[in-house]
Image (spheres, rainbow, N blue to C red):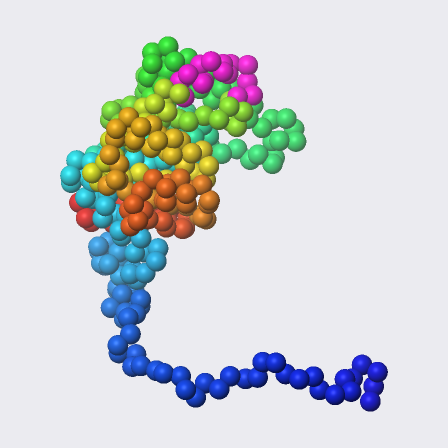
Amino acid sequence: MGPFELKERKKQHYRPMDVSGLSTFSMGTRQHKVDKAAVAKLPEKGVSAAAFLDSLPDFLGARQLRQLARVIVEAYKNGRPVFFAMGAHVIKVGCSPIIIDLMERGILSGFAMNGAGGIHDFEIAWAGQTSEDVGANLHEGRFGMTTEAPDYLARAAKRGREEGIGLAAALGEIINEEELPHREMSLMAAADRLGKLAAMHVAVGTDTVHMHEAADGCDIGQASLIDFRRVCSAVADLGDGGVWVNVGSAVVLPEVFLKAVSVARNLGADLDEMYTANLDMMRHYRVGQNVLSRPVKDGHSFQVIGHHEITLPLLRMMILEGV
């Protein structure tokens, strides 16, 4: 016997269980989560949008997207507000026309965005292009060093503070007043034209325009604070079926929403029947807590994980088919 072999087999403490006495029941009496009626249909080439949307399997993300579309349609029909809170990526992947269309149809009551969203929205309006190559410009000290965005954002912050209209509304006004060549693609210009809520929530130091001499902390802070308080009023109006949809913001806008909910409830707003949703490429802690869980009742929140350039066009068509 080798030096690493046991001289005698150790006593086994856990013998294989005898399962001959298990009780069983018929599968026909069991409740199931999957039914063949909910599986994917196979529409033929050239079918209508309605037929295609109806063909999606009624599970998980597709089901959540349908439910979100349903509550948005109900809010629209009942005269209740619907707001989107968006990160800049929504603009960068080409979804601005979807947001503008929903505002023009009267379905979307307005939006909130972070500071980066405001910059990308302006750049699209001015140049028809946005999203510089950070890696290519950073090592040469050129990243964020264009002249137009710092100038326009600084002017908007000053006007927003002095006139008490906030940062996003002021920038939308300027884009329209100066007839920037691609203003039809601007969310803020559309909100100004349509009389919708536009708000920009700035974290100082996070945006390229803050690197420039034109940036004024007093103007930026006061104008963005006005936007926050406008959002508080919007959130206070979400009772009885209003909808708040977080789209691609992991931290800033979920925090803004939570504070706005607290302000609204402190001042007497009844938000028990509002709905919330999250559309993003991954799950985030603050969104789960601050948008989907803490502010709303069970069953009043929805989440769809996926790329904006896929989920937002699908949501728009679902909404239009239900209106």
Q: In the picture, which quadrant includes the C terminus? A: top left
Determine the residue positioned at 61% across, 81% down: 13
Q: Residue furthest left?
A: 78
Numbered range of the magenta stretch? 210-224
Residue 106 placed where, x, y %?
21, 34
**Which residue is located at x 57 percent, y 84 percent?**
15
Counting the numbered discs, the total is 0
Q: Residue 201 appears at what percent x and percent y?
A: 42, 27
Residue 213, percent from left and from top = 55, 14
Name the foreground residue: 89 vs 233.
233
- As drawn, is 77 to the left or to the right of 57? left
Residue 183 among those drawn in magenta: no
Camera sees residue 213: yes
Q: Is residue 119 visible?
A: no
In front of the other: 187 or 28: 28
Instruction: Decide: is 10 above or below 312.
Output: below
In the rendered image, the vertical position of residue 98 relative to residue 195, given as above or below: below
Relative placement, left or right, of 234 versus 76 is: right
Q: Residue at x 33, y 32 (%)?
A: 261
Pinpoint residue 79: horizontal percent, then vertical percent: 17, 35
- Using the image, determine if residue 126 lies above or below residue 1: above
In the picture, residue 138 is in which quadrant? top right
Q: What's the magenta bit mostly, secondary-structure-wise?
A: helix
Q: Quadrant of the N terminus?
A: bottom right
* Side of 163 where 127 appears, left or right: right
